[in-house]
Amino acid sequence: MAAVRGAGSDDISGSVAVLAALPDYFSVQTHRTLAAEMRIGRSWVAEDDSGEVCGIVQVMARNAKAAEITFAAVLPQMQRRGIGQALVARALVELHDIGVAMVEVKTLDASSGYQPYVGTRAFWESQGFVQIDVIDPLPGWEPGNPSAIYVAALQRTALGPSVR
Ligand SMILES: CC(C)(COP(=O)(O)OP(=O)(O)OC[C@H]1O[C@@H](n2cnc3c(N)ncnc32)[C@H](O)[C@@H]1OP(=O)(O)O)[C@@H](O)C(=O)NCCC(=O)NCCS
């Protein structure tokens, strides 16, 4: 099983290499975005037995109680071994511990008809993320790429049914 650890700028090239191995999901522009975000956000990587980066999760704070997972990727040959799950679980625990209540993920909506993202949405749903909206066009995304907005609650944010 790959080992998950917090990452830093020394891990940028290995993490970008993971994106580069997934051209159906990540353009060259996104490689630059990940490199920039790894200098200012929070990152976790998974290492294989030889110490090479085989997975990455990148998180950007949106405010004190909200954060967005902006990148999640695992090398194709290492997928479906629990590495993505381990990365996301580690990130969510650490975000919870610093007071984050809501975590957002944006991915390609089912209405796109784009097959590679069927598994991606299944992954987020398996991790407890709930789709709350579709935005098309999403500012900053290429037209014709409907964005599925997913959230996961790490803490209660409202009083809920106990008010009744
Ligand atoms: C999405 C991704 C990060 C998941 O990482 P992973 O290590 O393959 O996922 P895991 O092995 O931890 O999967 C956990 C669970 O998610 C679900 N899941 C993951 N991939 C799936 C797929 N292709 N189809 C259906 N369910 C899937 C399953 O329930 C799985 O549990 P199981 O294997 O016991 O059935 C990885 O597949 C990836 O890099 N995909 C391409 C890039 C991408 O889509 N990134 C996210 C952009 S928003």
Image (cartoon, rainbow, N blue to C red):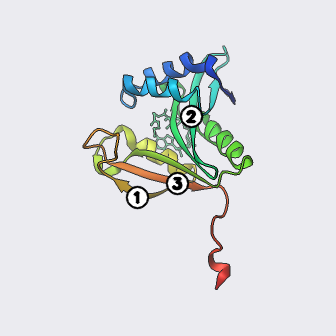
Q: Secondary structure at mark 3?
A: strand
N-terminal-most mark, 3 or 2: 2
Estimate the spatial distance between the alpha carbons at disc 3 and disc 1, rounded to whole Å.
10 Å
Q: Which residue: 40% across, 29% down?
A: 26
Residue 41 position by quadrant: top right
Q: Which residue: 63% across, 69% down?
A: 158
- Residue 80 in picture, x, y percent from top left: 54, 35
Q: Residue furthest top?
A: 50
Q: Quadrant of the C terminus?
A: bottom right
Image mark for residue 133? 1
Q: Secondary structure at mark 2?
A: strand
The residue where tag 3 is placed is: 151
Q: Please indicate, yes or no, whether residue 21 appears anywhere in the rendered image.
A: no
- Residue 101 in picture, x, y percent from top left: 64, 55
Q: Quadrant of the N terminus?
A: top right
Estimate the spatial distance between the alpha carbons at disc 3 and disc 2, rounded to whole Å.
16 Å
Q: Which residue: 63% across, 64% down?
A: 157
Residue 88 position by quadrant: top right
Crowding near the residue tagged with mark 3, few <14, some 14–19, many ≥20 C-alpha atoms within 10 Å = many
| Type of the residue with mark 1 | Asp
Q: Residue furthest right?
A: 97
Front one among 49 and 137: 137
| Type of the residue with mark 2 | Gln
Please determine whether, in this image, residue 82 is positioned above or below residue 38: below
Image mark for residue 58? 2
- Residue 46 in picture, x, y percent from top left: 63, 27
Please determine whether, in this image, residue 43 is positioned above or below residue 135: above
